[in-house]
Amino acid sequence: MKRISLFVGVLALMAIFIFVITSEKDGITRIDVKTLQNKLENEEIMLLDVRESSEYEGGHIEGAVNAPLSSLNANQLPYPKDEPIYVICRSGNRSAQAASQLQDAGYTEIYDVSGGMMAWESIE
């Protein structure tokens, strides 16, 4: 019984370690919509909306550039890789995927907007 408890404990520690390593990717910062709103009011930022074109056309944040995740090629984006880039989608899932692609392409300062447009629409 002690061996099983020890084994389960070691597995639990390994799972926690793996979760921490994979959830804290350097260069990707999650921000909330209030923070995004403040940035938009006070700075000129690059905001990528990674929803499909039909979703984007149905309503988007002024100044956001549509770059659908389904056709996103982060290596071909015309933006400086050492400048901040903000990513938003409908709920936060696609923006997280896009943020990972941007990171893999060499972007160093990526902001993933938590809650996406659903959260944005709740503050307006």
Image: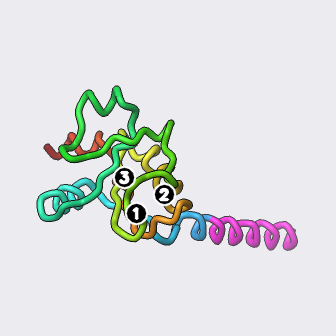
Q: Nearer the viewer, residue 61 or 73?
A: 73
Q: Indicate the amino acid at tag 1.
A: Ile
How many angstroms separate mark 1 from mark 2 (CA)? Answer: 8 Å
Q: Are marks 2 and 3 in contact (CB under 8 Å)?
A: yes
Magenta span includes 83? no
Q: Earlier in the sequence, mark 1 or mark 2?
A: 2
The residue that disc 1 covers is 110
Q: Are marks 3 and 1 in contact (CB under 8 Å)?
A: yes
> Residue 50: horizontal and vertical position, in percent?
39, 42
Would you say 117 lies left or right of 7 here?
Answer: left
Q: Relative to 61, is 79 above or below? A: below
- Give the crowd class for mark 1: few <14, some 14-19, many >=20 residues within 10 Å: many
How many angstroms separate mark 3 from mark 1 (CA)? Answer: 8 Å
Residue for point 60% across, 64% down: 19
Q: Quadrant of the C terminus?
A: top left
Q: Earlier in the sequence, mark 2 or mark 3?
A: 3
Q: Are marks 1 and 2 in contact (CB under 8 Å)?
A: yes
Q: Nearer the viewer, residue 69 or 82?
A: 82
The residue that disc 3 covers is 87
> Residue 98: horizontal and vertical position, in percent?
47, 50
> Residue 77: horizontal and vertical position, in percent?
43, 52
Magenta span includes 10? yes
- Give the crowd class for mark 2: few <14, some 14-19, many >=20 residues within 10 Å: many
The residue that disc 2 covers is 102
Q: Indicate the amino acid at tag 2.
A: Leu
